[in-house]
Amino acid sequence: MSLGEHLVELRKRLTIVGAAVLATAVGGWFLADAVWLALSAPLLQVAEEQGRAATINYTAVTEAFDTKLVIALVLGVVISSPIWLYQLWAFIVPALHRREKQYAIGFLGAALPLFLAGCAAGWFVLPHIVELLTGFAAEGTATLLTAKFYLDFSLKLILAVGIGFVLPVVLVMLNFARVISGRAILGGWRWAILAITVFTAIATPAADILSMFILAIPMVGLYFIAAAIASINDRRIAKRDAALAAEYGIDPTSA
């Protein structure tokens, strides 16, 4: 495909993703109040346990509406994850051979539950991070947060963990499709750590170094697990190809 054809294909995929997110965000609008109540509960609970005052404030006329709208859009992203995960893989597939398209099913089968598990993990650790970070406040002080800041903190944490769980699957599936080798994945570990650090720095609020490392450490671990799985797959394929070459006297790379 030419560059122009790739751009047309990308526009097509992005249009489908945008339509899916907007459609599911409509349903997410009706769930936004319940989700916001659940997101804000850890802060209020921790403050009660510590005997301190804590409130979430709306500092602008439109902030309550904006908060609900953002939650609805994020719910749309989560609910429509099967669609945009498939579109992500479908954008890569045209550049591959026909026999490699079978990995699309495996990609979705692994990426979707891992993304949802990552979001669930982010939701699970949110109260602990809130408790840890608010615990540094001096005794007798109050925690007064704007709704925009707290929502930004919570959603970035949850979505970052979800996306972080998916990225190693992309690497493994590209390795299974023989697009990238395990050695290449492992060889790029320095750049991977740098990219993960930048990603987690963007995903967490400014100056929140602790949350950044809480996200970065498991993502680095998953990267090396993906490299290990890819290396094992490379050795398996090399042994199989060597056996075929020895048995039939052919060059397996030409098959």
Image (cartoon, rainbow, N blue to C red):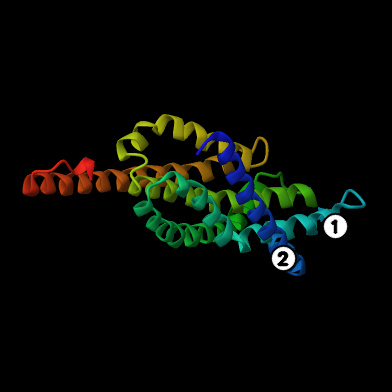
22 vs 69, nearest the viewer: 22
For residue 65, above or below residue 212: below
**Residue 156, position as x, y percentages in the image:** 64, 48
As drawn, is 106 to the left or to the right of 27? left
The residue under label 2 is 28
**Residue 143, position as x, y percentages in the image:** 77, 50
68 vs 55, nearest the viewer: 68
The residue under label 1 is 65
For residue 22, above or below residue 195: below
> Residue 50: in sight, yes or no?
no
**Residue 22, position as x, y percentages in the image:** 72, 59
Foreground mark, 2 or 1? Answer: 2
How many numbered circles are shown?
2
Residue at horizontal 11 percent and vertical 44 percent from the top: 245
The kind of secondary structure element at disc 2 is helix
Near mark 2 (Cα within 10 A), the count class, few <14, some 14-19 or many ≥20, is many
Residue at horizontal 68 percent and vertical 56 percent from the top: 74
As drawn, is 225 to the left or to the right of 85? left
